[in-house]
Image: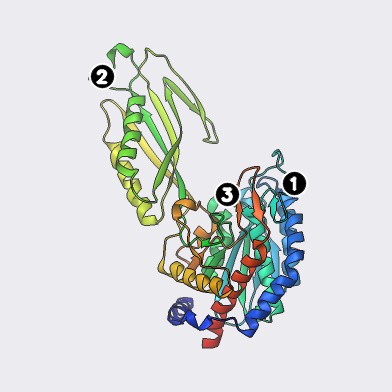
Amino acid sequence: MKLILRTFIFLFIFSFSISGFSQLNKTEKKIIKAVDMHTDESLKLLEKAVNINSGTMNFKGVREVGELFKAELDKLGFETQLTSGEAYGRAGHLIATHEGKPGLKLLLIGHLDTVFELDSPFQNSSMENDSIMKAPGVADMKGGDVVIILAMRALKEAGILDEMSVKIVMTGDEEKSGDPIELSKKDLVDGAKWADVALGFENGDGNPGTIVTSRRGSSSWKLEVNGNAAHSSQVFTYKVGVGAIYEASRILNEFYSQLSTEENLTFNPGFILGGTSVDAEEDNMGGSASGKTNVVAQKALIRGDIRAVSQEQLESAKATMAKIVSDNYPQTQTKLSFDDGGYPPLDPAEGNSKLLEFYNEISQDLGFGSVSAVNPRNAGAADISFTAGHVEMAADGLGLSGADDHTVNETGNLNMVSRQAKRAAVLMYRLSQNQVSKK
């Protein structure tokens, strides 16, 4: 039944002429007015949120931010809950649901956590000038969470929200995913299966003239190499071979030679250990190695990541890497493994491109200029990727514009809060009205 409804919605939205919205209608003007009326209080909400430390592993702080936003969504008539993250070792998520009339179902995605833990020197907000706020998580992504709430408030006051079906998922572990990731992202995936359109409110690339229609996925790989330990005077002989470090070097060089020119594909060796003995740390973030200059290296270990713009590209790259690894130097043995428990790619789907067309038209109708797609090379992995394959349309980067995310210099442009809320609210209104009016 849902597949039939989705197909109907998809075909209808595609056939609807967006040129009919060349000017704002009465309801859209109400939405704009409501955003303007509540922008100041939204900025106060943002200031309060960024001054609560919610580093991913500060569970108390993450839940405190969740409670703050939960209270705002409760006022708007959402059914809200803060879930437990005990099963995957994190604070849990904020989930808010509003069931309206049958029709289009929208999933809005945010996150509560930041990269700034309690031991970070960056804990409080300050103003760089009258519009630029320097604060932990202001752009990534408490600003985006506030944009969601402001857009919902505007839709409520314009009399539109009551007719809409909206689910908001603000995760508590976007910056450092819980384990197992299948449980960590289950609520997000369930929301995507429920929805028809997914909108993410990350910062994107910091440019309000862009949104993200495709994101590269992120997973990791491990290369283990074994050679024959022997006196270095016997290296390259038939009996001893070349040793583990030479073999590891061959493989890395071939990875680079055969794959580095492929568009939107990257693979980075994060660390390498090699020698007579190798001891990796339990968290797989490093380790130690020892050896002697006159001994052929017996072991090597390399760990890295791989990022691809589609599942097809990822599988092709993995096959090429496996072929390279299998062509061993003499007297070496290798093992290449992949950890696919990372972030999947958000493929550059046709529906996502169509959503960009809608958003671009709306932005121009509002007088905010045109909008284009972010180059996938400039968009890291994010929660929106878990909606891939479950929704007809998805886009990210609808949140607060900012700069220097993940650093102690992170900033957000407060002038963009109302602009982003207006564009998002009108987009949601038009999409839902298409379906409601067709019914």
Count of labels shown? 3
Please determine whether, in this image, residue 151 is positioned above or below residue 251.
Answer: below
Residue 285 rendering spot, x and y as whole percentages: 53, 35
Q: Nearer the viewer, residue 154 or 130?
A: 130
- Looking at the image, which is closer to me, 172 or 336? 172
**Mark 3 or mark 2: whose residue is earlier in sequence:** 3
Say if 317 sits above or below 212 in the image: above
Instruction: Give residue 31's position: percent from left, percent from top.
Output: 66, 77
Badge 2 is on which residue? 236
Earlier in the chain: of badge 1 and badge 2, it is: 1
Q: Image point 71% across, 38% down: which residue?
A: 121
Judged left or right of residue 157, residue 395 is left
In the image, taking residue 241 as reference, residue 278 lies left or right, namely right
> Which mark sits nearer the N-terminus, 1 or 3?
1
Q: Which mark is nearer the camera, 1 or 3? A: 1
Report the residue marked by disc 1.
124
Give the Cα distance between marks 3 and 2: 45 Å
Task: Tell me the SS state at disc 1.
Answer: loop
Q: Secondary structure at mark 3?
A: loop
From the viewer's perspective, is the residue at label 1 or at label 2 nearer? 1
Q: Which mark is residue 177?
A: 3
